[in-house]
Amino acid sequence: MNRHLISAADLSRDDALLILDTAEELSRVADQSVKKLPTLRGRTVVNLFFEDSTRTRISFEAAAKRLSADVINFSAKGSSVSKGESLKDTALTLEAMGADGVVIRHGASGAPHRLAQWVRGSVVNAGDGTHEHPTQALLDAFTMRRRLGNLEGRRVTIVGDVLHSRVARSNVLLLATLGAQVTLVAPPTLFPVAIGTWPCEISYDLDAVLPKSDVVMMLRVQQERMNAAYFPTVREYSRRYGLDAERMARLPDDAIVMHPGPMNRGVEIAAEVADSVRSTIVEQVANGVSARMAVLYLLLGGSEPAIGKEVSA
Amino acid sequence: MTAYLIRDARVLGGEPTGILVRDGVIAAVGANLDGGDAEVVDATGLIALPGLVDLHTHLREPGREDAETVESGTKAAAMGGFTAVHAMANTDPVADTAGVVEQVWRLGREAGYCDVHPVGAVTNGIRGETLAELGAMADSAARVRVFSDDGHCVSDAVIMRRALEYVKAFDGVVAQHAQEPRLTEGAQMNEGEMSAALGMTGWPAVAEEAIIARDVLLTEHVGSRLHVCHVSTAGSVEIIRWAKSKGIQVTAEVTPHHLLLNDTRAGSYDPIFKVNPPLRTPDDVTALRHALADGTIDCVATDHAPHPVEAKETEWAVAAMGMIGLETALHVVQEAMIETDLLDWAGVADRMAYAPARIGRLSGQGRPIEAGAPANITLYDPSPRRAVDPAAMTSKSRNTPFAGLSLPGRVVATFLRGRPTVLEGKLQ
Ligand SMILES: [Zn+2]
């Protein structure tokens, strides 16, 4: 496995399966009364968040702490970063602090690549611009495996703003690696022009794809797309590409509905769908911690076995 | 003034011959010349080219002297074999008045390494709104003939039409940075397979091609002269080819980096490869090379764009656009055009000296190496190959995308009106 996790494309099939299997093992920790393992004791993980994302930061923080790592939260807001300090200078500071792992969330695509050139520790991409969010894809795959078993040949439909979605990019890459059949659904304006080169099918017609889907993943519609002529109105988007109860009824019986959050209820997903038994949205949050524990454990090479000892203190 | 007898030079790659330089002009060309007291320069194995002319150089002075000055930029130009450069207008203040263009012109004269021909802004402050005093700049000591808002597109069709019409009065040319602004808001790199994978906002080829198509039609309509800066796409080549076939007075340039590099370089997210227009696809690179070979694209221009280190040591999105090119241009052209048999050395002389001088209406530059011509000569050894070393650049800036790349050739000497600015590979 690579030293960093920057793109889902960095993962071979064996890497991905190892992470998912490890996540499965580690998830048992969550069921124990003491939710902590000693495996990363003495290691330092820095959460470097240049964008507000409380949910992702908390998820990584919980993952690192359950592995007994020291966690430093470095938020760009109100820090030297917002006063014009460069990413490079921040990287040098992290080096001086001896960070073993850096979890970075950044508004610019490729910022984790740049950071990885300047630090010795492992870099984990927690979402970069409109590029990738590989741990989201891992937790999504983990969630699908738990509900559906092996993903080989499973039909996964991802609906929404593919052009700007780091979740879609990472999911397409990881799911292709795992042998799933991915179909992306969006209005043509929200696909990249070169979408034909991606390892997936595309469709403009959600209703035609739904009956052939084992998984439907709804992407959030960002506020800023709504005023940039990507679609005429939010109502029209919702009518053509939103998942409501009527559409959900066209899914096969055991199909699941996913959303990476945060949701726009009533836009891309109806409340009754989000709260239905098909929905995995709450599980995804819990699974995120397990998937991120597995990534941190495998990248930071804990000398202890992942499972087996509990923290005594 | 010292006289020089250049011995056994292969003029435009031909048979070895002598070139006698005296009083700033070429006194004679031929075998067995009697140089008298002239200093002998042994040019065995070297190719003699007319001094190179760059239509597109950012010298950054006034305003960004931390990145480049007229002096440092013209030294770099001399080291690259150039004897004339056109200094782009997007300085601070903008070169949109006779005062600023005369200042830049004078700084070039004082430095003395290379002729500096200021480009005048088309519009005040390169804001695209109101015409700058084009006539005053043309009539100034700098004798401006090339006008450009480079860095920005003259996107307003009426302003572009008026500029094209107005410069006819003094045989000027409007050099357009062709970029439809609305189609390129926030654009980071070529729009295509790479931008889709990398999650970066695309700069579509059509944003360049649409402006070129409009501008050649405007040029035909008003009977003026258009020059297209840094052509980067196969589609642009097609439009220019069509326009030339109709007799429209359009000329075009291509940069060395667009002749050699493609958009897969962005995969590193290293903004050393961030440039405007962006690096395009391998198919575009092939089309540009063939267009330069067949003359659809008239010349090579560097778009030398110096930036300080901190402007590039950042995440891609916030990095400055542009790359330096004066000191690597001839090497890249050798690699892309000579080594591929697309051009011979006579072709290189045309694309890098005669044609740009003609487009810029320079009388004392871009002349064949023959008796009576001003002695602007570059001696070039095409045989050695070496890795490009940014630290060895004469430019104040280091942002070369060719760092570490093995390129052929070495500029051994540059003569500016008979005076060596570079000799034995060293700045004089
Ligand atoms: Zn330009």
Image: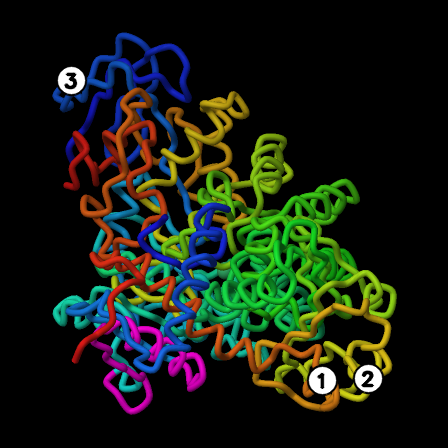
Kind of residue at disc 3: Gly
Please name the residue that numbered disc 1 is placed on.
A276
Q: Check disc 2: other Cα within 10 Å, few if <14, some if 14-19, many if 20+.
A: some
List x then y, in percent, for residue B344.
49, 22
Residue at horizontal 56%, vertical 62%? A141
Marks 2 and 1, Cα distance to the nearest angstrom?
9 Å
Q: Earlier in the sequence, mark 2 or mark 1?
A: 2
The answer to whether residue A105 is left or right of residue B7 is right
Kind of residue at disc 2: Ala
List x then y, in percent, for residue A246.
86, 82
Residue at horizontal 59%, vertical 53%? B228
Query: Do discs 2 and 1 share a chain?
Result: yes
Chain letter for mark 1, please. Answer: A
Marks 2 and 3, Cα distance to the nearest angstrom?
98 Å
For the rendered model, the colour scheme is rainbow
**Magenta region, residue range:** A51-80
Marks 1 and 3, Cα distance to the nearest angstrom?
99 Å
Q: Does the magenta-highlighted stretch encompass residue B195? A: no
Say which quadrant the N terminus of chain B sits in.
Answer: top left
Please name the residue that numbered disc 3 is placed on.
B36
Kind of residue at disc 1: Ser
Cβ of mark 2 under 8 A from ligand 1? no
Do tag 2 and tag 3 residues touch (Cβ < 8 Å)? no
The answer to whether residue B418 is left or right of residue B211 is left
Looking at the rendered image, the disc whose residue lies closer to the viewer, 2 or 3, is 2
Chain letter for mark 3, please. Answer: B
